[in-house]
Image (cartoon, rainbow, N blue to C red):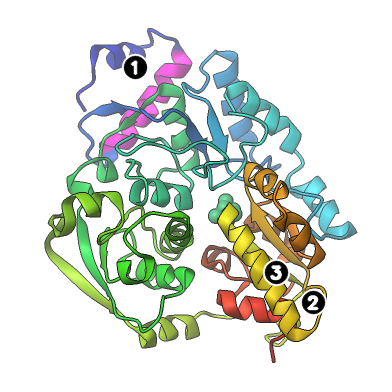
Amino acid sequence: MKLTTELQAILDGEKGEVLSKVAKTLVKYGEIFGAEEMVPVTSKYNHLVTSFGLKALGPVYELMDQLIESGNLSTQQFSCDPRPLDKNVPSNFLLDFIFKNFMYSRQDFYEGQLTKLGLKDKNAFTCACYMDEVGNKPEKGDILSWAESSAVVYANSVLGARCNRNSGIIDLMGSVLGYVPKFGLLTDEGRKATWVVEIKTTKKPEAQLLGSAIGMKVMEEVSYIKGLDKWLGTELDDAACTYLKDFGAATASNGAVGLYHIDNLTPEAVESGVALIAEGAKTYVIDDAELERVYREYPVIWKNKDAKPKLCFMGCPHMSLEQLKSWTDKVEAGLKATGKSKVVIPTVFTAAPGVLEAFNKTEYAARLKATGVITSYICPLMYMNNPLAGKMPVITSSNKLRTYTTARYYTDDEILLQITGGAK
Ligand code: F3S
């Protein structure tokens, strides 16, 4: 690794032992992946993935203390993944007892550390930090030090920023040093597609299902997707961005995708087109039958496969304002069709605190509340990590939640039928 004089001095301890250790860690990490230089983080804000004050994270709290006490704070302010607890979400005495005593008992303490380190504001807890209402939206070409997989794939693909899929500690270190090693998705070569995906479905594919199919096929490789502009259009409007948010999260969690290009739609594909496709790229064709196959092969790991769902989580990744509004319309219409006045399964829609604030100022908020749907800023995955929640029959249309927990996946239409009492 070739280092600038400034970085070499940091490494040699000129700015103290703690920052020297941070720099050494990042340099070693980069060298493992063949990086030849360190490049400055250029985004206005950073985003940290570790948002939960888990009792078992003692070494992280020690590391944070060392950084704070030595004055090595984050070089930019940052947003953070969602909080793990919210009293609005249905719970019970035992669940709460485990959450508070065995799981997130250090939440307040950890949030105190995050604030000292450079948390943007007390509302900056969301995985969808790039929403306008949150304000952490990198520019095209920005170099980032992020780790949240759903946000990394969105920033790379939809915004054209550059970020590798880092771990939580690496994103923290990159944010403190203000530099990251240049390799992988930070390079032009690493952003080339080694897969061409051809969409040949007869209707708009379900975002979370399509993302799952592609993720499981290409794993960590980059894909160039043709035929999706037919369904999404050629403009990155609210609807297309919302679709890509959910699609990308599924590619990133069902596989390990950090970047995809959509022909005629995402910024680099619009700019360079098929020149982004690497020589010898493989092809994957997706039609209705392929999506059906992927869906049917998901394992159902509920003890009783016919159990009546006890809870429904929507919004993993966090919902956009447009999604909250369109789902309000859908739930109302669904209830009207079934003749019911409220949802028949406790249902939680999750979104960023800033998005919820904006939503609450619209006439949709009272309408959604009247349907019985609850809104929250929680991370459903952190809720499901409670062993008692893991035993509950929970449904979702999030393929990330399906992958990491016992929650059962249904398409958006199926979820709507279930929560409005229209499912057979
Ligand atoms: Fe976001 Fe938590 Fe899902 S961080 S993507 S809501 S698992």
Work out how far the residue at label 2 is from the one at label 3, CA to CA, in angstroms.
Answer: 10 Å
Asked if 62 appears above or below 162 in the picture, the reply is above
Question: Magenta part of the protein: which range?
Answer: 17-31
User: In the figure, is residue 124 to the left or right of 298?
Assistant: right
Asked if 216 appears above or below 273 in the picture, the reply is below
| Residue receiving disc 3 | 312
Where is the C terminus found, in terms of image quarters? bottom right
Where is the N terminus found, in terms of image quarters? top left
Give the dominant element type of the magenta stretch: helix, strand or loop. Answer: helix
- Tell me the amino acid under the disc marked 1: Leu
| Marks 2, 3: nearer the viewer | 2
Residue 93, x across and y down, in percent: 89, 57
Q: Quadrant of ligand 1?
A: bottom right
Work out how far the residue at label 2 is from the one at label 1, CA to CA, in angstroms.
Answer: 59 Å
| Residue receiving disc 2 | 344
Could you tell which of marks 2 and 1 lies nearer the N-terminus?
1
| Residue receiving disc 1 | 11
The residue at the far front in this view is 363
Q: Badge 1 local density, few (<14 within 10 Å), some, or many (20+)? A: many
Residue drawn at x 57%, y 41% as measured from the top left: 133
Q: Quadrant of residue 109?
A: top right
Nearer the observer, 374 or 111: 374
- Tell me the amino acid under the disc marked 2: Val
Mark 2 residue element: loop
Residue drawn at x 36%, y 84% as measured from the top left: 202
User: In the figure, is residue 48 to the left or right of 116?
Assistant: left
